[in-house]
Amino acid sequence: MTAKRNTPQKGIILDTLCRMRSHPTAGELYEEIHRLHPSISRSTVYRVLGQMEEDGLVMRVCLMGSDDRFDGNVIRHNHIRCRRCGAVADIPWVEVAHPCDTAGYEVTGYTVEYTGLCPACRKAQAKQIG
Ligand SMILES: [Zn+2]
Ligand SMILES: [Zn+2]
């Protein structure tokens, strides 16, 4: 008995996360799930999210100045965050060279976070400037 039970809740939570392209926080994901499936509790969403993260089905995204967010896209990619509205989008992965001086540290990983203005905010700004 090594097969993991694929509970219906797990399917609903994963589907909802994959459908939301916004990289929701656990709380935001719960709100959306609760709207459609009021019987699924907050603790179930948090517990199942943790399990799915361990199983590599979802990715936890840590961005500066934001609660941890979750991503149903587990193919390696980078993120760009709008510095005006906080929206997060997927962008293709680009390999970054390690610096030649790592201050005596062994490098085990790195995080690249691009910031900018999302299309909606660029439009709003263009309107303001006229
Ligand atoms: Zn924006
Ligand atoms: Zn992503």
Image: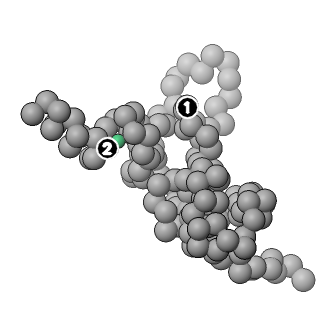
Q: Is residue 124 above or below residue 17?
A: above
Dot 1: few (<14), some (14–19), or many (≥20) neighbours within 10 Å? few
Q: Earlier in the sequence, mark 2 or mark 1?
A: 1
Q: Secondary structure at mark 1?
A: loop
Q: Position of residue 22 (x, y in %)?
A: 47, 55
Q: Position of residue 13 (x, y in %)?
A: 64, 69
Amino acid at pointer 2: Cys
Report the residue marked by disc 1: 65
Q: Quadrant of the C terminus?
A: top left
Q: Does residue 81 appear anywhere in the picture?
A: no
Q: Is residue 108 above or below residue 35?
A: above
Residue at 54% from the left image edge and 32% from the top image edge:
64
Dot 2: few (<14), some (14–19), or many (≥20) neighbours within 10 Å? some
Between 46 and 40, the one nearer to me in the picture: 40
Q: Residue furthest top?
A: 103
Q: Secondary structure at mark 2?
A: loop
Mark 2 vs ligand 1: CB below 8 Å: yes
Amino acid at pointer 1: Gly
Q: Position of residue 94 (x, y in %)?
A: 41, 45
Which numbered dot is residue 118?
2
Q: Quadrant of the N terminus?
A: bottom right
Between 38 and 77, the one nearer to me in the picture: 38
Residue at 37% from the left image edge and 34% from the top image edge:
84
Residue at 52% from the left image edge and 23% from the top image edge:
100
Residue at 80% from the left image edge and 77% from the top image edge:
4
Q: Which image quadrant is residue 111 in?
A: top right
Give the side of residue 4 with respect to residue 34, left or right.
Answer: right
Q: Position of residue 48 (x, y in %)?
A: 75, 64
Give the side of residue 27 with respect to residue 44, left or right.
Answer: left
